[in-house]
Amino acid sequence: MPVDVTAVVIANRPLSAAYNVLTLAAPAIAATCTPGQFVMIKAGLTSFDPLLRRPFSVFEVIRDSQGTAAAITILSKRIGPATALIYDARPGEHMACLGPLGRAFSIVEAPIEAWMVAGGVGLAPFATLAEALASRGVQTTLFYGARTGAELFYLDFFRSRGVELVLTTEDGSVGERGRIVAPLERALAARAPSSPVMVYACGPEAMLAATARATQKHGRPCQVSVERVMGCGLGGCYSCVVPMRGDDGLTHNVRSCLAGPVLAADQIVW
Amino acid sequence: MDLSVRLGPLTLKNPIIAASGCFGYGVEYADLVDLSSLGAVVVKGLFLAEREGHPAPRIVETPAGMLNAIGLQGIGVYRFVEEKLPELRARGATVIVNVCGTTLDEYVEVSRVLSDAEGVAALELNISCPNIKEGGIQFGCSLNGTYDVVSAVRRATRLPVIPKLTPNVTDVASFARAAEEAGADGVSLVNTFLAMVIDVETRRPKISNIVGGLSGPAIRPIAVRMVYECRQAVKIPILGMGGIADARDAIEFLIAGADAVQVGTANFVDPFIWAKLLDGLSDYLQRHNIARVADLVGTIDTRSQDQEWISS
């Protein structure tokens, strides 16, 4: 069950001129959230501008020296006034943090391999997923694309958890030049049909659609974490809908806050 | 202290109501909020059939507010009665259903279905949604249309009938009067203000429907004024709303003449706002030695400073 906490900002680490990792003291959320779930955050507690909260994937769960979940981090990209408040936040500041919310990833077991596909800030749900997969001994690969090498973050975090990295940048500064779906496609084509794999994806809509097409073409299951403008995160406002094919064969607008944010890629009408 | 309020034949335990379109079907919040602690829950607007609404993006934030064009996505009245109403009843919620229609007949038919169901306390007629092409606001922007819908539903049900009025008219009080003459048990106001936001870089509207309804604290002073005007015009109860974000705002509407208030957008920001509103209201009544919240309704003092001096 979600809780709303007034969380203290413990740390705020800028990763670039746009990206930052914010650490919030929210033990009740940290203790119960599972990979793929999200929180609704409002910086500027009493301000009407911006008025609404913003959804963020839980990026990391931070544990204290006893191993107790004490805090969460979020990976944010500054794109407007609300994320500017997140970027500029100072330790000691308070933020309203509601969570954990939404449906999490379904986590596979060995011998199924896990391939995580991330674009830009879409890296966010994969840190906790990688840890969960590692604890189950699942062999995991991260396909991770960004505009430039300076925006590929947390590579050592994933390496240290045994995750194999496949990197692309649009400017070719690190890894292969181009979009991340190209190496994913090649890997899907090269994989023996008898070797099972689960694809997890989060990132820009075009990347998700291309990943959905590629996995469908090669007959692989794919779970995508979608990002939508959300008003409430609790199913009240009906703003975050995704068109999905229902069991009746018709397309229905589904609230991604309740049915998602993790959804089956082959049911989404891209 | 008596927080109960009477809305025609209906008595609510308190005047704090969850507004339609901002609280799903109520069941979404049942684990977070004690639904029975609210004066009532107004569930999302229902037509006869299911509707998918508009494509995303459906909302955009504005200074101290938000614009929405959801397009009345909904599961239809039959599925509501079957799938949602039993849980709402089990949770002890006082259920008001927001009734939609593209034709007069549809309003009547939806109302009949709800009247036959167990556990509906009142009908709120949605003649004011700015985001659908047919029905709704077409009725609510014409005095005759308002009168016709209210009187047709009035004849079809014994439940209290409460049309929800649009602020997108020149004189909202005349619409409240038309509703009263047609036999309404009360009026809800205001629905959202038709509005628009453009992305100047792409020159595209920020929501898929191009225009949408503005809600939130930005509209509150206009809504208070409209409630005040309607209070002068009609005797039936008024359910006031528009940008209420805390107890002070709710009290402002009561003083202006609302018998009860509805809270919508603020629930998105703080889903736990309800207990805070009720506590704040109780504190205020205590502080002002008011025994019954009903005694606060319409108590605005519009005397000039001069008169106040003379009378004191």
Image (cartoon, coloured by chain):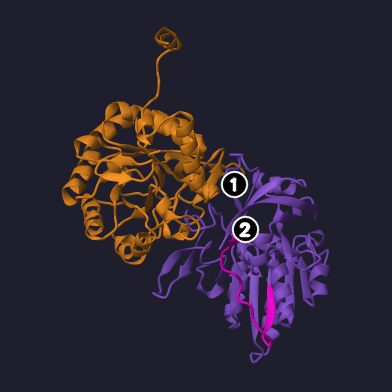
Residue at image location 83% in from the left, 66% down from the top = A174
Q: Which chain is orange?
A: B
Is residue B206 something one can see in this rendering? no
Location of the N terminus of chain B by quadrant is top left
> What amino acid type should be assigned to the residue bearing mark 2?
Val
Where B17 sits versus A186, above or below? above
Mark 1: secondary structure: loop
Q: Classify residue A69 as left or right of residue B19.
A: right
**Residue type for callout 1:** Thr
- Image colour for chain A is purple
Output the chain of dot 1.
B
In the rendered image, residue B196, in percent from the top left (x then y), is placed at: 49, 41
Judge the density around disc 1: few (<14), some (14-19), many (≥20) Cα neighbours within 10 Å.
few
The residue at which mark 1 appears reads as B202
Of B78 and A62, which appears nearest the observer? A62
Residue B197: x %, y % from top left:
52, 41
Looking at the image, is A16 positioned above or below residue A226? Answer: above
**Position in image of residue A150 (x %, y %):** 82, 59
Can residue A10 be seen at all in this image of the molecule? yes
Question: Most prominent secondary structure in the magenta stretch?
Answer: loop
As measured in the structure, the alpha-carbon distance from the residue carrying label 2 to the one carrying label 1 is 30 Å
Stretch of the chain drawn in magenta:
A99-116
Residue A104 painted magenta = yes
Asked if labels 2 and 1 share a chain, the reply is no
In-image side of A151 versus B57 (left or right) = right
Q: What's the chain of the residue with tag 2?
A: A
Residue under numbered circle 2: A39
How many other residues sit within 10 Å of disc 2, few (<14), some (14-19) or many (≥20)?
many
For residue B7, the mark is none
Q: For the C terminus of chain B, which image quadrant?
A: top left
